[in-house]
Image (cartoon, rainbow, N blue to C red):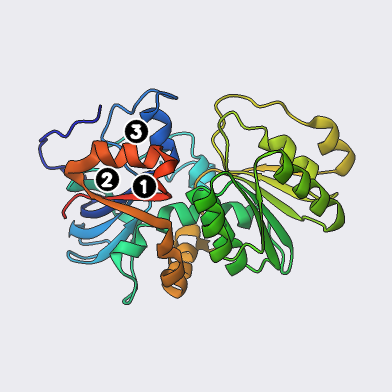
């Protein structure tokens, strides 16, 4: 059972801003602890957040009233990883909503440098997808995705669906997907997947047959859990191809070492987002949303006031509701 509590307003440090949260999405990792798959965080959860700056240091690039997306990371900024722009693997990284209070609140304290101003014309109600879309962008940039390559996305939850869109924006020639539920399959097609395979036996057989006749250059695994999708991805990818791991597995899945070896498959882990080669994954994500918000907003299937948080999590957990992305609006 989730409960709301009245707590003091956050006190910012010298390099912090305070953001008035206007929308915060529920992530699959949130559902993991909600369903008992992991211990719940000891802090206020929520990391997919957008809002309006309530206060900021004078030296920051944002000002009071600015509409912003929040990159929910607090790295040390001093280690070798941070200096390379790979602060997502900083050994001292804190994640808002996991290690520090997150966005399922009216106000949240964040590093001022983690705020991205939103362009005019991009509604906050759409911009709440910035964080999960950046997860997909980051993975595909790690591949790296080449123009006109074929991409297979395993899983059509919110990250999988966003990976379909990101792949097309980053130059994929075509995208295939797998989907467990009919509403996910229909949305995958509307978002640009030219082929969608169900996850039952016939669908798996059809995917194997299709991949044997058409080279799949990049596979994005977005399911995790206890699924056998790592083996499925290695089997489907072409020799010399890349399998990206985005899904959060419950433990260490069986590793298809023979397939990886004989096909020289690159298996690449991908965790959240960073700023490599001068451009942040968040910036690219915002640009995609700005240009394609009418299509992407279809992912947001439910919106709730923060006072309805228990109902929101139950809805997000039950895919028979048609839920894809469920969003809470703390100041609604």
User: x, y percentage for residue 213?
Assistant: 86, 56
Q: Estimate the x, y position of residue 112 in percent, counting from the top left.
A: 29, 54
Mark 2 touches mark 3? (CB < 8 Å): no
- Is 228 situated above or below 269? above
Q: Earlier in the sequence, mark 1 or mark 3?
A: 1
Tell me, yes or no, if residue 273 can be seen here: no
CB atoms of marks 2 and 1 within 8 Å: yes
| Disc 2 residue crowd, few under 14, some 14–19, many 20+, Cα 10 Å | many
Secondary structure category for the residue under label 3? loop
Q: Residues within 10 Å of mark 1 (few under 14, many from 20)?
A: many
Left or right side of 184 for 110: left
- Identify which residue, 196 or 276, lies in the foreground: 196
Residue located beneath label 3 in the image:
99
- Residue 232 in the image: x percent, y percent? 73, 39
Q: CA distance from mark 1 to mark 3?
A: 10 Å
Which residue: 58% across, 69% down? 169
Is tag 2's residue or tag 1's residue first in the polypeptide sequence? 1
User: Callout 3: few (<14), some (14-19), or many (20+) C-alpha neighbours within 10 Å?
Assistant: some
**Could you give the CA–CA distance between mark 2 and mark 1, rounded to whole angstroms?**
9 Å
Image mark for residue 72: 1
Q: Which residue is mark 2?
A: 103
Q: Residue at x 30, y 36 (%)?
A: 100
Residue 158 placement, left or right of 66 = right
* Quarter of the picture holding the C terminus: bottom left
Q: Viewed as shown, does residue 172 lie left or right of 295?
A: right
């Amino acid at each position: 059972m989730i409960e709301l509590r009245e707590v003091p307003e956050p006190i910012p440090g010298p390099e912090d801003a305070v953001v008035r949260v206007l929308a915060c999405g529920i992530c699959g990792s949130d559902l993991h602890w909600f369903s008992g798959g992991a211990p719940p965080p000891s802090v206020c959860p929520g990391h997919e957040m957008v809002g309006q700056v309530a206060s900021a240091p004078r030296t920051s690039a944002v000002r009071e009233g600015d509409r912003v997306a929040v990159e929910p990371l607090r790295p040390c900024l001093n280690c070798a990883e941070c200096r390379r722009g790979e602060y997502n693997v900083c050994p001292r990284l804190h994640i808002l909503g996991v290690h520090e209070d997150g966005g399922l609140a009216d106000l949240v304290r964040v590093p001022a440098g983690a705020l991205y101003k939103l362009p005019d014309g991009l509604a906050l109600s759409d911009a709440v997808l910035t964080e999960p879309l950046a997860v997909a962008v980051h993975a595909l940039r790690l591949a790296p995705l080449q123009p006109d390559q074929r991409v297979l996305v395993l899983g059509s939850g919110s990250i999988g669906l966003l990976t379909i869109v990101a792949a097309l924006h980053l130059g994929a020639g075509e995208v295939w997907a797998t989907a467990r539920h009919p509403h996910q399959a229909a949305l995958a097609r509307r978002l640009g997947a030219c082929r969608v395979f169900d996850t039952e036996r016939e669908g798996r057989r059809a995917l194997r047959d299709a991949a044997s006749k058409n080279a799949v250059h990049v596979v994005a695994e977005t399911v995790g859990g206890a699924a056998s999708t790592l083996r499925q991805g290695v089997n489907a990818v072409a020799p010399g191809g890349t399998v990206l791991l985005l899904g959060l597995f419950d433990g260490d899945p069986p590793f298809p070492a023979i397939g990886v070896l004989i096909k020289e498959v690159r298996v690449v882990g991908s965790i959240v987002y960073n700023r490599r080669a001068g451009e942040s994954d968040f910036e690219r994500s915002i640009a995609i949303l700005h240009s394609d918000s009418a299509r992407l907003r279809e992912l947001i299937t439910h919106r709730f006031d923060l006072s309805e948080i228990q109902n929101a999590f139950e809805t997000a957990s039950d895919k028979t509701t048609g839920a894809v992305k469920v969003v809470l609006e703390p100041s609604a």
